[in-house]
C-alpha cells in the first residue's frame, strides 16, 4: 500500500490553495461573523478579483502592482453593485442577491462571445509571469522528502503566508477598535446602532468591501501557481469557505486560517484513505463515486459543526450565532 | 434617589388654554400635519403638536393609537406620507435615523435592544458620539483613539454607576435581566449626550423595585436640562413624573394638558383609559356594570342572559360571558 498521501496531506498545510481559502474565509468572517452580513457570494468576489488580475496582467500586460490594484478595485466595485440595492434591506435579501450574482459572474465569463477577454471555459493561464519575475529566490528545489518546492512555488507560499499574517493583523486591529464595536453592534441589532447615531448602511458597505478585497487578494495567491478557471468559483467554493470559517470560528481572526488548514488537510487525507480503500476493494464504491463521497463527508462535517460546536474551534460559545 | 412623590411639576408651559395642538412657550419639537398610512389604515394623523422643552412629556393612549408609529416617524425610523416636524429650528422630515440621533434626539425601543453579545461596557461605549476610532483609517492606528477611548470608558463607568450596573460592566448584555436591559438601554442613549430623550414604554416588564429607580433616573434627566418624551401605559407613572400629557387615539391627538387635569377629564378617562378599568369584562356582572352607563337595551339583554345562566346551571356564580 502507498501511504504517500499522508505526506501530501501534510503538504496541504502550506499549499497556496490553503492560503487562498484562509484569506477568503477571513474576508467572509468580517462580513458574516463580525458584521452579520449573510454573504453567499464570496466565490463571486474571488472570481471578480481573479479576472481583474488575470485580464490586466495577461491580456493587457500591466505591471504586477497595477494588476493587484485592478483586482482590488474590481472587488470594491462588485461590493458596491451588490451592496447599494440590498444593504438597506433585511439580510436575507443580501444572501439571495450575492449567491445569484456570483453565479452570474461565473456564467458571464464563460460566455463564448467573451472568449478573447476571459478565455471562456478555459479560463486564463500565465498569471504568474510578472509575479515570478520579481522572485528573489535562486532556482533550485527546496524541502524535505517528497515535499519539495521549486523556487516559484516557495515564492508564492512565502508571499501568501505573509499576506495572511498582514490580513489577520489588519482584521484583528479593526475588530478591537471602535469601528469593530460598531459592526459587532450591527450584527446584534442594527436599529439599536442606528438609534445611537451611526450610519449603519455605510458600515455594512465597508465590511462587504473588506470581505471582497480579501477574497480578491486570496484568488491572486490561488491562480499564480496554477491558472484561473471559472468553474473553481462556483457556489461550492462559497460553501467550502463557510465550512472553513465555521470550523475555525466565525467570530475569530485566527479561526478561518486554522479552519482552512484543517479543512484541506482533512479533505486530502480523506481522499487518500478513500482511494486506498477503493483500490483495495475494501468499500463497495467505484473510483468515479469516490470524489462525490468526499463532498458528502464535507456536508456532514458542516452539519455536525453547526449542531455541536457552532462557535467553531477557537470561538467563544457565548458569541456563537447564526443570526441574520 | 430623588423623591419621586413630590417632584416639582412645571407650570405655565402653554400659551392659552390646554387643548389638542396648543402652542407652547418654548417648544423643542413642533410637528405639523404628520400622517402615516398602512394600506387603508391611517396609523398616525397628527395635525399639530408641540413638545415643551426641558420638561417631561408623556404620550398616552390605548393600544394601536399610533404612539410608537409617531415615535418612529419623528426619529426617522419610518417615513411619513405627509408632514414635517421642526426640532430645535431644523426641519427633520426625511432626515435618516442616524442623523436625527446625532442632532441630539435619541430614542429607546419598546422591545429592548440590548446588544446581547457585546459586554455592558461595550454597549455603553458604542453610544459615545464623534469617535475618531469609528472611522476606518483611524481605526487602524490605536494611538489615534486610545485617549478618547479612555475618556469614553470613564464616562461610561460613571453612568453605569448611576444606573447601578457598574458591577456588570464586563458581562455580556445577554446576561442582564429584562429590567436591567431597560436601564442599560437608557444609559446607552445618554452616552450620546442628547437634548431630547424619547423613551418607548420604559416601564414595560420592569419589576416594581426597579420602577422606582427608573422613575428617579427619568426625573434626573429633567434636572440636568434634558427634555423627555415618553410613551407609557402605566398611569401611575404618568401621573407621578409627567409635567405634560398628550393623549392619542386612532392616530390623532385628542387631548393635551397637565397630568391631573387630563387624567381627571372624564372624556379622556372614559374613551382612552376606560371608565371601568377596574371592572372584569370577562363576567356578565362586569359587563352589566358597564352597560348600565350607556345602553338600556344591552342592560336588558345581559340581565336576561344572567337569568338564563342561573336557570341552566343552577348556579349564581359569575359565569364567563359568552355574549
Image (cartoon, helix red, strand yellow):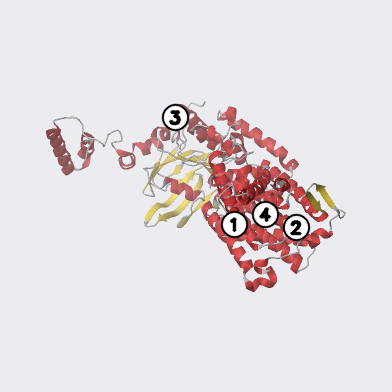
Pick whichever of labels 4 and 2 is earlier in the sequence: 4
The answer to whether residue A90 of the structure is visible from this angle is no
| Contact flag, marks 4 and 3 (Cβ < 8 Å) | no
The nearer-to-camera label among 4 and 3 is 4
Q: Quadrant of residue B320?
A: top left
The answer to whether marks 1 and 2 sit on the same chain is yes
The nearer-to-camera label among 1 and 3 is 1
Q: Is mark 4 on a helix, strand or loop?
A: helix
The nearer-to-camera label among 1 and 2 is 1
Per the image, the residue denoted by label 4 is: A215
Between B173 and A127, the one lying in front of the other is A127
Q: Distance between the residues labelled 4 and 3?
A: 50 Å
Pick whichever of labels 1 and 2 is earlier in the sequence: 2
The answer to whether marks 4 and 3 sit on the same chain is no
Q: How far apart are marks 1 and 3 (CA)?
A: 66 Å
Q: Is mark 2 on a helix, strand or loop?
A: loop
Disc 4 packing (10 Å; few <14; some 14–19; many ≥20): many
Give the chain letter at badge 2: A
Residue A205: x and y in percent read 62, 54
Q: How far apart are marks 4 and 1 (CA)?
A: 31 Å
Per the image, the residue denoted by label 2 is: A225
The answer to whether marks 1 and 3 sit on the same chain is no
Residue A315: x and y in percent read 62, 39
Q: Which mark is residue A78?
A: none
Q: Distance between the residues labelled 4 and 2?
A: 17 Å
User: For this view, does B180 lie left or right of residue A109?
Assistant: left
Q: Which mark is residue A288?
A: 1
The nearer-to-camera label among 4 and 1 is 1
The answer to whether residue A19 of the structure is visible from this angle is yes
Disc 3 packing (10 Å; few <14; some 14–19; many ≥20): few
Amino acid at each position: 500500500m502507498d501511504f504517500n498521501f499522508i505526506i501530501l496531506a501534510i503538504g496541504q498545510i502550506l499549499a497556496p490553495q490553503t492560503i487562498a481559502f484562509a484569506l477568503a474565509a477571513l474576508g467572509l468572517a468580517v462580513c458574516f461573523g463580525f458584521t452579520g452580513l449573510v454573504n453567499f457570494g464570496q466565490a463571486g468576489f474571488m472570481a471578480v478579483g481573479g479576472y481583474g488580475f488575470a485580464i490586466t496582467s495577461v491580456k493587457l500586460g500591466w505591471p504586477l502592482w497595477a494588476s493587484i490594484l485592478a483586482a482590488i478595485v474590481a472587488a470594491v466595485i462588485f461590493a458596491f453593485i451588490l451592496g447599494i440595492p440590498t444593504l438597506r434591506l433585511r439580510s436575507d435579501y443580501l444572501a439571495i442577491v450575492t449567491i445569484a450574482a456570483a453565479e452570474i459572474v461565473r456564467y458571464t465569463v464563460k460566455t463564448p462571445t467573451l472568449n478573447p477577454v476571459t478565455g471562456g471555459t478555459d479560463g486564463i493561464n500565465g498569471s504568474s509571469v510578472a509575479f515570478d519575475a520579481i522572485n528573489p529566490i535562486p532556482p533550485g528545489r527546496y524541502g524535505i522528502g517528497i515535499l519539495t518546492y521549486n523556487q516559484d512555488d516557495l515564492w508564492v507560499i512565502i508571499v501568501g503566508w505573509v499576506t495572511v499574517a498582514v490580513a489577520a493583523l489588519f482584521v484583528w486591529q479593526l475588530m478591537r477598535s471602535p469601528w469593530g464595536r460598531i459592526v459587532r453592534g450591527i450584527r446584534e441589532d442594527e436599529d439599536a446602532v442606528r438609534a445611537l447615531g451611526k450610519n449603519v448602511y455605510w458600515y455594512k458597505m465597508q465590511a462587504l468591501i473588506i470581505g471582497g478585497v480579501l477574497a480578491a487578494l486570496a484568488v491572486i495567491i490561488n491562480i499564480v501557481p496554477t491558472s484561473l478557471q471559472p468553474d473553481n468559483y462556483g457556489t461550492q467554493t462559497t460553501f467550502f469557505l463557510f465550512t472553513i470559517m465555521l470550523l475555525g470560528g466565525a467570530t475569530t481572526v485566527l479561526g478561518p486560517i486554522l479552519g482552512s488548514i484543517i479543512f484541506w488537510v482533512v479533505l486530502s487525507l480523506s481522499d487518500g484513505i478513500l482511494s486506498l480503500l477503493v483500490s483495495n476493494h475494501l468499500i463497495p464504491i467505484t473510483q468515479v463515486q469516490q470524489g462525490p463521497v468526499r463532498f458528502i463527508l464535507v456536508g456532514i462535517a458542516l452539519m455536525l459543526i453547526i449542531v455541536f460546536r457552532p462557535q467553531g474551534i477557537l470561538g467563544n460559545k457565548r458569541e456563537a450565532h447564526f443570526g441574520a | 434617589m430623588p423623591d419621586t412623590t413630590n417632584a416639582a411639576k412645571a407650570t405655565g408651559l402653554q400659551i392659552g388654554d390646554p387643548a389638542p395642538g396648543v402652542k407652547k412657550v418654548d417648544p423643542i419639537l413642533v410637528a405639523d400635519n404628520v400622517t402615516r398610512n398602512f394600506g387603508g389604515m391611517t396609523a398616525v394623523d397628527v395635525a399639530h403638536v408641540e413638545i415643551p422643552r426641558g420638561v417631561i412629556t408623556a404620550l398616552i393612549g390605548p393600544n394601536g393609537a399610533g404612539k410608537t408609529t409617531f415615535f418612529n416617524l419623528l426619529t426617522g425610523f419610518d417615513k411619513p406620507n405627509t408632514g414635517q416636524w421642526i426640532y430645535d429650528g431644523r426641519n427633520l422630515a426625511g432626515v435618516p435615523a442616524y442623523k436625527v440621533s446625532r442632532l441630539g434626539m435619541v430614542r429607546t425601543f419598546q422591545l429592548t435592544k440590548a446588544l446581547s453579545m457585546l459586554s455592558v461596557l461595550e454597549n455603553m461605549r458604542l453610544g459615545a458620539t464623534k469617535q475618531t476610532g469609528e472611522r476606518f483609517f483611524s481605526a487602524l492606528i490605536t494611538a489615534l483613539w486610545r485617549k478618547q477611548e479612555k475618556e469614553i470608558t470613564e464616562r461610561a463607568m460613571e453612568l453605569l454607576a448611576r444606573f447601578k450596573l457598574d458591577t456588570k460592566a464586563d458581562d455580556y448584555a445577554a446576561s442582564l435581566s429584562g429590567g436591567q436591559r431597560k436601564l442599560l438601554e437608557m444609559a446607552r442613549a445618554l452616552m450620546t449626550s442628547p437634548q431630547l430623550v424619547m423613551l418607548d414604554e420604559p416601564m414595560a416588564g420592569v419589576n416594581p423595585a426597579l420602577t422606582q429607580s427608573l422613575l428617579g433616573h427619568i426625573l434626573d434627566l429633567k434636572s440636568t436640562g434634558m427634555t423627555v418624551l415618553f410613551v407609557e401605559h402605566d398611569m401611575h407613572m404618568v401621573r407621578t413624573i409627567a409635567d405634560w400629557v398628550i393623549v392619542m387615539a386612532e392616530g390623532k391627538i385628542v387631548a393635551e394638558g397637565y397630568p391631573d387635569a387630563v387624567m381627571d377629564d372624564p372624556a379622556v378617562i372614559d374613551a382612552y383609559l376606560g371608565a371601568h378599568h377596574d371592572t372584569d369584562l370577562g363576567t356578565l356582572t362586569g359587563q352589566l356594570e358597564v352597560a348600565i352607563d350607556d345602553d338600556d337595551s344591552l342592560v336588558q339583554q345581559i340581565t336576561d342572559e344572567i337569568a338564563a345562566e342561573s336557570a341552566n346551571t343552577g348556579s349564581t356564580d359569575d359565569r364567563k360571558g359568552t355574549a
